[in-house]
Amino acid sequence: MDDTLRIQANEILNSAPCSIEMPAGTGKTHLLAAVAAIAGEKGRRSLILTHTNAGVDAIRTRLKEFGVRSDSARVDTITGWAFILSLSYARIAGLIIPGVPDWTRSREYVVAASRVADANAIVRVHELSFSYLLVDEYQDCSTSQHALVTALSKAIPRTVLFGDRLQAIFRFDDQDPLVDWDQDVLPAFPEYKVAVVPHRWRGHNEALGTWMLEIRGQLVAQGSFNALDHQVEGLKFVSNSQQGDIASVAFGFSGVDESVVLLDKWPSDVAGHASRLKGIYSVMEELQGKFMRQALEQLPPDGDYRLAHWLGVFAKNCAIGLADLDAPIMSRLLKNQGITRYSRRGITDILEALEAVRSDPTYERLLRSAEVLKRNPGVRIYRWEGWRDTLAAIRATIDNREPPADNLARIRDRLRYTGRVHGGSRAPRVASRILLVKGLEYDHVVIANLANFDDPRDLYVALSRARKTVTIMGRSHRITF
């Protein structure tokens, strides 16, 4: 850590409680980690909260870079910490919850955790456990989450909030709106101003970083964005009048050490792009695992002949190369009729594997047949997370006899601690929604359809993920917010 950063981190600790606003890519997470590192050097422990699993990963990575000991900082999501408080002090929380979180009930956990944090006994616990409270991406806090942080800050008054109003892309219902920075944040956590430098782009594309700082005000003030109005190195617009245009752009990045993210708005669009890109781009799933959960809700019980049909449907939803696993075959599986008389070039082994499940409908057989599907040279899985974790949940059910959905919840919950793992020798090629890449950065960003980014905050977050290049695609080069 250089002397300038060390001095600044010390000043922030001495200024707490305070709030810091910094644009994307200017070192906000780096500064937060530096603050935690200096606190650790003083023998003080920090509770660090953010919103997403990706954000937790990013913070932990920075803490490791600064050599922060694991016992000097506890990092979690706001809802994750809320769940821990509610589960640990259920009587105070006034909420009965299972040992495995159901993230569709996140707001309930947060409200219950606020009651816990306000209790005198728990105030004392937090006082003894932590010297500093650091919260990242504060612009994404709902009013209920802000109430929880405020309650925590009573026990940990040396609180520092980090955020950027232009990156407020989470959407809550009218009963739990986003926190208002001027009315809710600044009165309790006065502004601490820092000089901003486009660190993300240093050594990659500094012109792009300078441009990102320049357009912040324009995105809000002008009410529109015209990609052709901006001439900057690394930024280009490509008309996607045909689906093949996305493939030509997506396959145009040859560097094996360079990461690429393809962004769109809706989950179905993201999955559609990945399926058309030959499995090179993998779908990033949300922490709750909605796709996997829905698949497991349809899973027949162990011993049910319909397991073969389920596996066929699941595989077709996760992979390309299974077009010949067609309606006649799927229909016969659903009727518990044999399929060995069918001849389908390139997938004979898959037909045999599905027939084996139909004849021996067990979860063990299903998992072995899934391996056959995966190994087929013509099959490319583009929903790797979904494929891996769904089958892992079934495998766990064989061992513990608990419902697959419960096992899935445990598997997905581990991501809060282990982070996402990208397999293979290449840097990740990911198809995602912007909500899931918040706090992350990639060498190259492809915005698949400009028309879907009709909120300036969504577009700003998408643009600012890129270190080197941004390719904007759309039928029109102009969007009105």
Image (cartoon, rainbow, N blue to C red):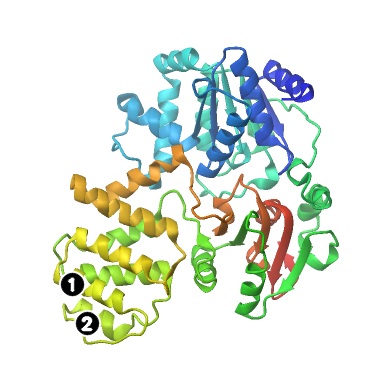
Q: Residues within 10 Å of mark 2 (few under 14, many from 20)?
A: some
Query: How many numbered badges does the structure rendering display?
Result: 2
**The N terminus sits in image quarter:** top right
Q: Is residue 473 left or right of residue 202?
A: left
Q: In x, y percent, where is residue 122?
A: 41, 18
The residue located at (72%, 35%) in the rendering is 21
Give the residue at mark 1.
358
Assess whether mark 1 and mark 2 are in contact (beta carbons under 8 angstroms).
Answer: yes
Query: Could you say where residue 375 lies in the image, as x and y percent from the top left?
Result: 37, 66
Amino acid type at image mark 1: Arg
Q: Amino acid at mark 2?
A: Ile
Q: Is residue 465 visible?
A: yes
Q: Quadrant of the C terminus?
A: bottom right
Q: Residue at x 21, y 82 (%)?
A: 340
How far across and down, in percent of the image, does residue 409 sit? 34, 46
Q: Which mark is residue 51?
A: none
Helix, strand or loop status at disc 2: loop
Percent across and percent down for residue 51 are 53, 40
At x 16%, y 60%, the residue is 302
Marked residue nearer the N-terminal end (2 or 1): 2
Q: Is residue 153 left or right of residue 231?
A: left
Q: Is residue 299 visible?
A: no
Residue 339 is labelled as 2
Instruction: Examine the rendered structure and indicate whether residue 115 appears above or below residue 52.
Output: above
Foreground residue, 470 or 132?
A: 470
Q: CA distance from mark 2 to mark 1?
A: 9 Å
Mark 1 secondary-structure assignment: helix
Q: Nearer the viewer, residue 300 or 342?
A: 342
